[in-house]
Amino acid sequence: MPPGESDWLAEGVAAARAGEAGRARASLLRAIEAEPNSVQAWYWLSRVVDDPEERAICLENVLILDPGHLAVQAELEELRRASVRANAESLLSREALAAAVPRSEEEALLADAAVEPLLCPYCGAPDPPQARQCSACGQALYHRRPRSRKHSIYSWLLITAWVALANCLWLATAGAYLVACVFPDGGGALGALQTLPGLEGLVLPDFDLPLLPLLLITVPGFCFCLFVAWGLYRRWRAFYWLTMGLVVAYPLVAIYWLASRGMPSWPVLVVQGLLFLGALALTSLAYEEYTWVDERLHADVDRDVDSASALYARGEVYRRQEMWAKAAAHWARAVALSPGHPDYQAALGLAYANLGRPDRAAGHLAQARQIDPGHPLALEVEAHLDELGFHREPGGG
């Protein structure tokens, strides 16, 4: 057993039996930090936490460490049944209240869809799903995003095609220049090219400029192609429609070329046709990735993060966007996974302070200061609470 764990555990158990929940939580968290696999510490922590969800997490940890603990199994089942009953009673009370108010058919449909409110990611206030703006803080509750969160193989091929086209501009110029320099009379490689179907009349232009100026001439086209590729990568719809427009205009350019130079051989027609059909199919298949949808924002935990450190980092992202309720949801999960980390406790306290819940903020602040008395973020939370005029009890931090 690590040094000090038994002392923190004994102190926490004694405080819990004496009814001093705050001191018991702080001591038990220190005990868990020293020994995360302490069944007794997790069990006694479940006795002193106020939030039913936090209590359930503590009991689940007890069962992970001691699957045969029948009393804890029964307690956890009862806690879950109580949570289901409370949710059902809340739902029924809202439905009964909505049914008691006379309303039109359209209002009834909207009310039925709004029985279960969603929490605003900024202030945590409940709002019906169809609300476009939070009734408490006035923030927008919907934002536009691409329908697909990740690029598919089709969009990647479309982006690659533009990058390849950018490189073909200067590579073709450099290659033609070098061939013209090496075989000025049309022999060698140029003669071999002229024997291929469709290239019988191939004549290289006279290059009166050195190679470097010629390559500089291709720079605007090179930059344009790369810019379109970047726009497609960023899901900018204007660049998608530009690509589609160029693909559709391709047959018109081909018709003009045929009218001015005469009918080419059939291999050239086949290659041109395949290029057009391939570009059209690829652009059409990528269409869904450049359509945008409205997404409701609410104070839930993102599904792609599961570790405590990732949850804390994602909470920092939402903190910078002033989505305090959404940040609090991530930090609360991080605290549940790693209760002995002072950064997570202090961050959650800061979120609760900004949400106007100073009591809960002070509780997490006390736990952070108990773990690290000089923690800078804990001091920031203290200063914020002082600005709000909330005074903690002496010795609470």
Image (cartoon, rainbow, N blue to C red):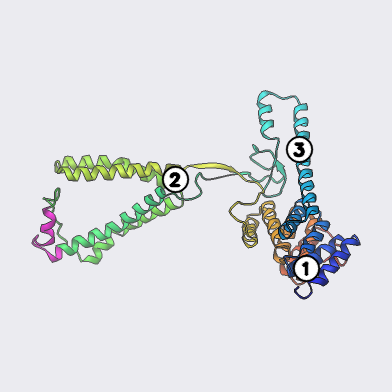
The amino acid pointed to by label 1 is Ala
Give neighbour class at mark 2: few <14, some 14-19, many 20+ (Cα, 10 Å).
Answer: some
Quadrant in which residue 263 is drawn: top left
Query: Looking at this view, is 228 or 7 the one in front?
Result: 7
Q: Position of residue 164 (x, y in %)?
A: 32, 56
Helix, strand, or loop for circle 1? helix
Quadrant in which residue 34 is drawn: bottom right
The amino acid pointed to by label 2 is Arg
Q: Position of residue 131 (x, y in %)?
A: 65, 38
Q: Is residue 208 visible in this depiction of the protein?
A: no
Q: Please tell me which of labels 1 and 3 falls first in the chain.
A: 1
The amino acid pointed to by label 3 is Ala
Residue segment shown in magenta: 180-195
In the displayed orientation, state which residue is furthest to the bottom: 3
Q: Please tell me which of labels 2 and 1 falls first in the chain.
A: 1
Marks 2/1 in contact by CB < 8 Å: the verdict is no
Helix, strand, or loop for circle 2? helix
Residue at the image position 77 percent from the left and 47 percent from the top: 77
Residue at the image position 15 percent from the left and 48 percent from the top: 198
Give neighbour class at mark 1: few <14, some 14-19, many 20+ (Cα, 10 Å).
Answer: many
Q: Which residue is mark 1?
A: 31
Q: CA distance from mark 3 to mark 2?
A: 44 Å
Q: Which residue is mark 3?
A: 88
Drawn side of residue 354 relative to residue 242, left or right: right
Q: Is residue 25 above or below residue 245?
A: below
Residue at the image position 76 percent from the left and 37 percent from the top: 88
Q: CA distance from mark 2 to mark 1?
A: 55 Å
Marks 1/3 in contact by CB < 8 Å: the verdict is no
